[in-house]
Amino acid sequence: MTPPPLFSIVIPTYNRPERLQQCLNAIAQLDYPHEQFEVIVVDDGSKESLESVVIPLQNTLQLRLVRQENGGPAKARNAGANLAKGKFLAFTDDDCLPAVDWLTQLKTRFERSPAGLIGGRTLNALPDNLYSSASQGLIDYLYTYYNPERNPSSFFASNNFALPTHQFHQVGGFDTSFPLAAGEDREFCDRWLHYGYPMIYAPEVQIYHAHHLTLRKFWRQHFNYGRGAFCFHQARAGRAGDRNSSRTVIVLFQSIDLPPLSDE
């Protein structure tokens, strides 16, 4: 019998086949033994089939493609985690390129902290794009604030963190009531700490983020981050008090929307 993989890499994706292909190509170049990790791609209701992207790499990677109706990245990540066979879950996004030693560095960290949530560093893959660079600069600032060197960490973005699979399920996975791809990772980290589990920032665990932004997309992205932050605070307050009040606010935000962007 083939032993289960150590890692299950979960990637939510939606309408970005070219970026997904680049992400999978980068994963195929990892210096970690391919028989010791699997890749689960969750198609969140893309308009076109992603089989043409996935099938050519199935001879190289332990790679599965599953499809769900569009429900957002939190729901997609949970769906991938429910299928995972690995001892550890490693989350990234379809517009990210893991460094060649990504899993190797994660394994080293888990050998020291087997019950921790390990958060890596995100690097800008598009330094010539002003808005992508500005967005990454803001993320870097937040990481400095929430993950100080001499104090416990408290926030990691879900495009680059890993944790034990059984603990992910124990804390309940990602909160799928969040209306956007914003804030659900912050809420998950806060709930993780609420359970008393450690968070460890590991800047040597690196991925490159290739999110091409225009001024309009930059504005839309950070407006959504603000909405997500508001929902996070409501959900956090609801954990100690009336959860129904936080759900009401989240539903209210779901009814306030901007014109959709084709690649977001």
Image: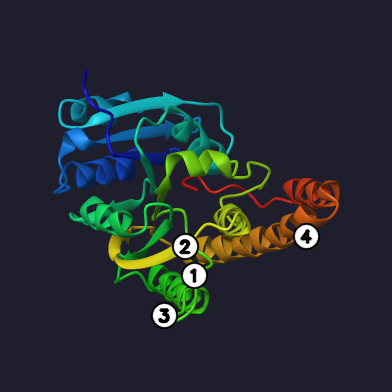
Quarter of the image for residue 62 reads top left
- In this picture, is 137 found above or below 32? below
Residue of label 1: 153
Mark 4 or mark 2: whose residue is earlier in sequence: 2
Q: Secondary structure at mark 4?
A: helix
Residue 16 appears anywhere in the view: no
Density class for disc 4 (Cα within 10 Å; few <14, some 14-19, many ≥20) is some
Image coordinates of residue 109 in percent, x first then y, are 30, 59
Badge nearest the viewer, 4 or 3: 3
Quadrant in the picture for the N terminus? top left
Q: Which mark is residue 237?
A: 4
Residue 260 appears anywhere in the view: yes
Density class for disc 3 (Cα within 10 Å; few <14, some 14-19, many ≥20) is few
- The residues bearing labels 2 and 3 have C-alpha atoms spaced at a distance of 12 Å
Mark 2 or mark 3: whose residue is earlier in sequence: 3
- The residues bearing labels 1 and 3 have C-alpha atoms spaced at a distance of 8 Å
- In this picture, is 213 found above or below 67? below
Is the Cβ of the residue at disc 4 closer than 8 Å to that at disc 3?
Answer: no
